[in-house]
Amino acid sequence: MRALIVEDEFLSRKVLRSFLMTLFDVDIVVNGREAVEAFKLSHTDGNPYDLILMDIMMPEVDGIEALQKIRKIENENNYRPRVKVIMTTALDDPQTVIKTFYDGEASAYIVKPVAKDKLYEELEKLGLLNK
């Protein structure tokens, strides 16, 4: 299985990678623009991501906008199954949660700092553990 970490903070990238590297082949990008490009490339290569773990607040293109672009690409190309996307943020803001779930169709949402047990709990709910 493949995972893409989309995170602009170095330490967060390292921590998330350490949590995921035993379960997934992990790629890392630093903003939403790169996330959309990596997503497109994964489909072009015939090896799409099973999981995207994406920060909401990033430079250039934020996580919400990137997620909307990814969902649009999936719909236009009829990509199935759709990639599971877990949004992460330091903001515990209900409006942001609602926006990511309803506008962006996020699969899950985790408030930072991301704890390994919380991440694994979400992966299990999404059917990405023990695949």
Image: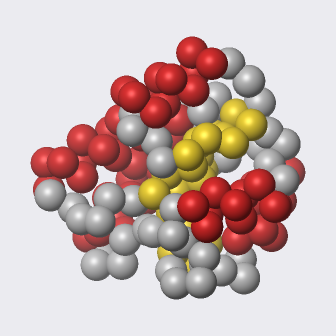
- Write down the quadrant of residue 33 in the picture: top left
- Write down the quadrant of residue 117 in the picture: bottom right
Q: Position of residue 67 (x, y in %)?
A: 42, 40
* 9 sits to left or right of 27: right
Is residue 104 something that shows in the picture? yes
Q: Position of residue 32 (x, y in %)?
A: 50, 40
Question: How is the model colour-coded?
Answer: secondary structure
* 22 sits to left or right of 70: right
Vertical comparison of 1 with 29: above or below: below
Is residue 34 something that shows in the picture? no
- Write down the quadrant of residue 72 in the picture: top left
Residue nearest the viewer, comparing 120 with 57: 120
Vertical comparison of 15 with 42: above or below: above
Farthest top residue in view: 95
In the image, what residue occupies the spot 57% across and 61% down? 125
Vertical comparison of 105 with 16: above or below: above
